[in-house]
Amino acid sequence: MPKTPLILVSNDDGFRSDGIRELARALKRLGRVVIVAPDDEQSASSHSLTLHRPLRVTRQEEGIYSVNGTPTDCITLAVHTILKKKPNLIVSGINRGANVCDDVHYSGTVSAAVEGALMEIPSIAVSLVVFGERDTHYGPAAAFAARLGRRVLREKLPPGFVLNVNVPNLPASKLRGYEFTKLGKRDFGDVIVENIDPRGRKYYWIAGNDKRFKNIPSSDGNGVLSGRITITPLQVDLTQYRLLDNMKDWKL
């Protein structure tokens, strides 16, 4: 573990969010923490990168910077411009809402960590599994992120891998431990809500039931519903090697 690790923290909820502030406080026990996060909410921004307009960085206070862009923009600017050296660890979160199952493909929180992994920086994404509750328990999620971060700083991660962590929105006393899981599968039900606006025109709202997961043993969906923290390793390399080997025999 480096003597004084440099830890970059980002998210997709914006630099003002309660989750990122709680996460940064917990990680300060491990080293120097710098926040570089969007200046407003960027949920479901996935891995989008801003290429067609200029980006601006604002220093909000010591160690906290906001960017008028996406989570991926934040990581890119932080590593190449804001920080004076490559961080030892990137932690993205704490997202207000689950990032389990199919969510990882849409999540700006997960994509910020994936961008770090593309740069071969050990990276973790952390989300709080909130299903519309008004009360949020960020403390246990932040404490667990610090525990995991300490282990990752010591053990490292293979290049190109991310740890995706989801913590049930429960007090610490009610959490049922943690488990290492695979990605599950959501069942959103009716995804599209159709309605009529005051001028009589149709509009559509992408919705769905957040709480429905397919019953897949050892999956992150099953884990969070049972009150356990889930840790799912994700890989940046999307190649399906088994299929690739089979395709080599194809005759076209």
Image: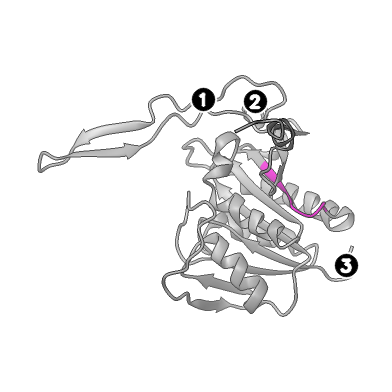
On the picture, is 137 further left or further right than 175? left
Label 3 neighbourhood size at 10 Å, few (<14), some (14-19), many (20+)? Answer: few
Task: Name the residue tied to disc 1.
Answer: 212
Compared with residue 171, is residue 108 higher up or lower down, i.e. above or below? below
Q: Extreme left residue here?
A: 199
- Badges 1 and 2: C-beta atoms under 8 Å apart? no
On the picture, is 85 further left or further right than 202? right
Badge 1 amino acid: Arg
Please name the residue shown 63% across and 36% down the image.
170
Between 197 and 239, the one lying in front of the other is 239
Quarter of the image with the C terminus is top right
Between 191 and 31, the one lying in front of the other is 191
CA–CA distance in space, label 1 to label 2: 10 Å
Name which of mark 1 and mark 2 comes first in the sequence.
1
Q: From this viewpoint, is residue 174 visible? A: no
Compared with residue 217, is residue 18 higher up or lower down, i.e. above or below? below
Q: Which residues are magenta?
A: 157-165
- In the picture, residue 105 is in which quadrant? top right
Task: Name the residue tied to disc 2.
Answer: 222
Q: Secondary structure at mark 1?
A: loop
Q: Position of residue 243 (x, y in %)?
A: 69, 32
Label 1 neighbourhood size at 10 Å, few (<14), some (14-19), many (20+)? Answer: some
On the picture, is 158 further left or further right than 16? right
Task: Name the residue tied to disc 3.
Answer: 2
